[in-house]
Structure formats: structure tokens, C-alpha cells
Amino acid sequence: MRSKKLILFDLDGVLFNTKLNMKKSWENVCINFFLNKSFQDYFSNIGIPFEDILKKIGINKNIKKIKKFYKEQSLKHKKLIKIYPGVKFTLKSLLRYGCKIGVVTSKDNERTKKIIKDYKLKFSVIQCPTAYLRGKPFPDTLLKAINKLNFEKKNVFYVGDTYNDYLAAKNCKIKFIFAKYGYGNIAFKSFATINNFKDLLKLKY
């Protein structure tokens, strides 16, 4: 493996298994706001910002209140979040090989940093959507992270698990690595794939 590479990671479905946390949080949202939307309705759109998911499944009212409540529920039940096997070992190995590592996610900044802190992980950059940065599949957050660390795109990889992750990497013109163990299913194969997190150490960068 060569040095001077930047490997950026999606959070949900790549570094952490957050599905049970999302399910519990979403079910409580539906109870509190009298919504008739299944968890599958919500989960099938994972990978884009929360507000965009709501609009996509036909929820156009009380978006700010729903987002606030969902966030509170997610933090309340954060013990349901589990780190994937091999993440800590692999990240430390990538750092030893000379790589820089970072996180680019559609999750909000507060929850992202709390989860990362709970598991004592360290990244050179953590980038979430802002009022001025569009979420995936737009490349804005990836570009911001890359520019913060002053890397050339040819030396940057994005590890994701959904089609929107792939589109974000494609729109950013960086290489994509598909985490097959995550939440998405991409039929075609024009990129590297990993079956588990440790497989990252087998790839040539």
C-alpha cells in the first residue's frame, strides 16, 4: 500500500451498524407524530440527508420538529449502535501505512461526533451536511473534506454502502469502494468491493 492517500468513510452501514437505533427512533417518531410510514419506507432511502428522506416519502409538514425528535430518540437509544468488527484495528493499520482517514456522512454533526467519541476513534476530518453544503448524492461534503486536507482527487477514496454514496463519489470524481456488508445493494460492479471492514487492508491504493 502506498502512502499519501486519503480514505473517507460513510458512517452508517460502513463504520457502524446503526439499523436498530434507526428503527427504534423512527418507530417513536411515527407514534409521536401520528405518521403512517413504515421503517422500510424510511430505511430504503438511507444515505441522503434526513430532511430529504422525509420529503421523498411524502412528509412535508413539521419537518424541523420531526428531525429534532428523531435526533433526541437516536441519542437516547445510542447503545443500540454497534461498531462493525475490525474497524478499530483496520483504521489503526491504515494510519500506520501512511494513509489519512476521515468521515463524510449525511448524519448531523452532533450525533456523528458523539458516536465517534464514544468509540474513541480519531479522524483527520469529519464532514457533515451544513446549510451551505448539499448532502449526497451531491459531492459538496466530499469536496469540503478533501479541500480541508489539501489532497488531490486522484489520491482519494470513498468507502460507502449505498447507491447515493457511489453517486457522490462519482460526482466528486474520486474512487469508490463498496461495502457489501452495509445497507445498500448496487447491481453493477465498476469499483472495488469489500465483504467486511478488514478487507480494506487487502486492496491496492
Image (cartoon, rainbow, N blue to C red):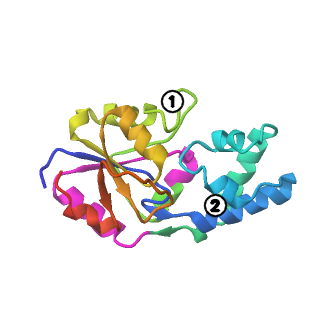
Task: Tell me the residue at 46%/59% (across/down).
Answer: 117
Q: In the image, is residue 92 above or below residue 136?
A: below
Q: Can the viewer see residue 122? A: no
Expressed as whole percent of the image width and height from the top left, the position of residue 143 reads 37, 32
* Residue neighbourhood size for the residue with mark 1, other residues' Cα within 10 Å, grouped as few (<14), some (14–19), many (≥20): some
Q: Residue furthest bottom?
A: 85
Locate residue 96 relative to residue 158 in the image: left or right.
left
Q: Residue furthest top?
A: 132
Residue that numbered label 2 is attached to: 22
> Is tag 1's residue or tag 2's residue first in the polypeptide sequence?
2
The amino acid beneath tag 2 is Met
Q: Is 94 inside the magenta-drawn segment?
A: yes
Expressed as whole percent of the image width and height from the top left, the position of residue 61 reads 81, 38
The amino acid beneath tag 1 is Leu
Q: Nearer the viewer, residue 127 or 179?
A: 179
Where does the magenta region start and end? 84-113
Task: Tell me the residue at 35%/51% (across/down).
Answer: 123
Q: Nearer the viewer, residue 179 or 15?
A: 179
Locate residue 140 relative to residue 123 in the image: left or right.
right
Q: Are marks 1 and 2 in contact (CB under 8 Å)?
A: no
Circle 2: element type: helix
Q: Is 96 inside the magenta-drawn segment?
A: yes
Task: Tell me the residue at 27%/66% (across/down).
Answer: 199
Residue that numbered label 1 is attached to: 133
Q: Could you say which quadrant of the image residue 201 lies in?
A: bottom left
How many numbered marks does the figure carry?
Answer: 2
Locate residue 120 relative to residue 146 in the image: left or right.
right
